[in-house]
Image (tube, rainbow, N blue to C red):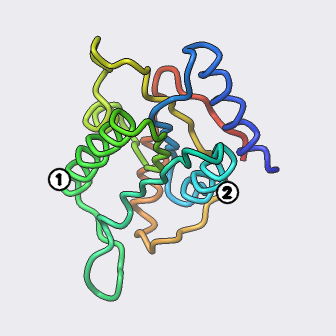
Amino acid sequence: MKDALKDAVSAVWGFERQHGSMPGVIIIRGAQGTEKSTLAKELADFLWDGARRPIVYETDTLHMIGDGGRYTWDRSTHLAALRLAGTQARLLNEKFGVPVVFPEVLGSLEEYNEAWPPATNDTAVPYALVLRATGEYENMHGVPEEEVKEDRANMIDIPGEVTLRP
């Protein structure tokens, strides 16, 4: 098991000990190419208890448009995708008790708060555990290098997130 997966599993178990339940949503954030999606799939496989397999929800598919799947990005589409994903993830968890693993860039607090506003008092389960991927860079989606450099430079810490080893 690679270090990032060990760290992620440890963070989930720590969350469970602290809150009495597994997080409803596990957000794996980081710059492009830090293996967020790969880690999300590995973590979902590891956490599967035979009854409830965590769902991996990737917003990348909402950005893959035109030109044979060429990756395109704009801020308004990105924030709309985050809102949609956040709403759907919460519904899946609240209605079916299925944890959702969500790999996403989420470079700023604005983007994070857009998708994951603070839990309300009527939410029975503390739902969000935030993990930060720091893996080696590989540009899987053909994002222009200038955008990748800008995203990495603007990546800020989110209070309470757990940084994973590469």
Q: Which element is circle 2 on?
A: loop
* Residue ID at (56%, 60%): 33
Please state the total of marks drawn on the protein image: 2
What amino acid is found at the position of numbered circle 1 in the picture? Ser
Element at badge 1?
helix
On residue 76, the disc is 1
Measured as percent of width and height from the top left, residue 152 is found at 49, 48
In the image, is 134 to the left or to the right of 146?
right
- Taking the image as shown, residue 94 lies to the left or right of residue 26, namely left
Which amino acid lies under the numbered mark 2 shown in the image of this protein? Glu
Q: Which residue is drawn at the image coordinates 42% and 41% (left, top)?
A: 154
Q: Is residue 29 left or right of residue 121?
A: right
Picture residue at 48% right of the left edge, 53% below the top: 56
Q: CA distance from mark 2 to mark 1?
A: 28 Å
* Residue 50 placement, left or right of 82: right
Q: Give the farthest residue toward the right.
A: 1
Instruction: Name the residue beneath numbered marker 2.
Output: 136
Q: Residue at x 23, y 44 (%)?
A: 83
166 up-or-down from 66: above or below: above
Residue 31 place in picture, x, y as percent: 50, 51
Q: Is 141 in front, or is 124?
A: 124
- Name above or below for residue 27 compared with residue 120: below
Q: Quadrant of residue 42?
A: bottom right
In the rendered view, tell whether residue 141 sits above or below residue 40: below
